[in-house]
Amino acid sequence: HLENVFLWELSKDSDQWYDWEYDGLPPPFKLECVRAGSHFGWRWTSYHADDDFDDEDEEDRCQACEVNWLDAGPNSKSIHFADYIDELETEIFRGYTQPPTKDEFRQLLKQGKRKR
């Protein structure tokens, strides 16, 4: 599987990279390959699937942006579409296909804390 071979992430030398002061969820600076049925794509995520977690907050710390499909993506009228959505669901970074700016990231974290 391609997703298990390569681990890509945003370079710290990039103009889009920034430090964050928050102790939990990091920005989505890691890239992962996505497969949903016969469809392939990629998305930015806060952690790679292989990253180790020392605590039980894994789900809160693993957040992803929307998928950038290499083809038309899953058909919303497909009987399996709900399965795709459940598997690829994003909460905090919904609507983002690339990492948010530092200011957007801070705002998203504030909004996320208010929802809990």
Image (spheres, helix red, strand yellow):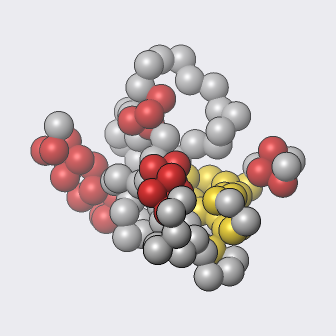
Q: Nearer the viewer, residue 60 or 105?
A: 60
- Count of numbered marks: 0
* Residue 96 in picture, x, y percent from top left: 42, 69
Quadrant in the rendering for residue 15: bottom right
Q: Residue at (52%, 69%) from the top-left corner? A: 78
Residue 27 x %, y %: 46, 52
- 87 left or right, relative to 22: right
View extreme (front): residue: 79
**Res 97 visible:** no
Q: Most extreme residue toward the bottom, as rendered?
A: 72
Q: Is residue 4 above or below residue 41?
A: above
Q: Residue at x 69, y 68 (%)?
A: 39
Within the image, what quadrant is residue 94 found in? bottom left
Q: In this view, does 65 lie above or below 75?
A: above
Direction from residue 32 to residue 17 in the image, left or right: left
Residue at the image point whose x is 34% and y is 58% from the top: 105
Q: Quadrant of the C terminus?
A: top left
Residue visible at 36% across and 42% down in the picture: 21
Query: Along the horizontal axis of the image, is 52 left or right of 58?
Result: right
Does residue 63 appear in this view? yes
Q: Which residue lies furthest to the left in this view?
A: 114
Of residue 95 and residue 75, the one placed in the foreground of this image is: 75
Q: Is residue 78 left or right of residue 1?
A: left
Which sits in the foreground, 52 or 41? 41
Estimate the x, y position of residue 91 in percent, counting from the top left: 35, 53
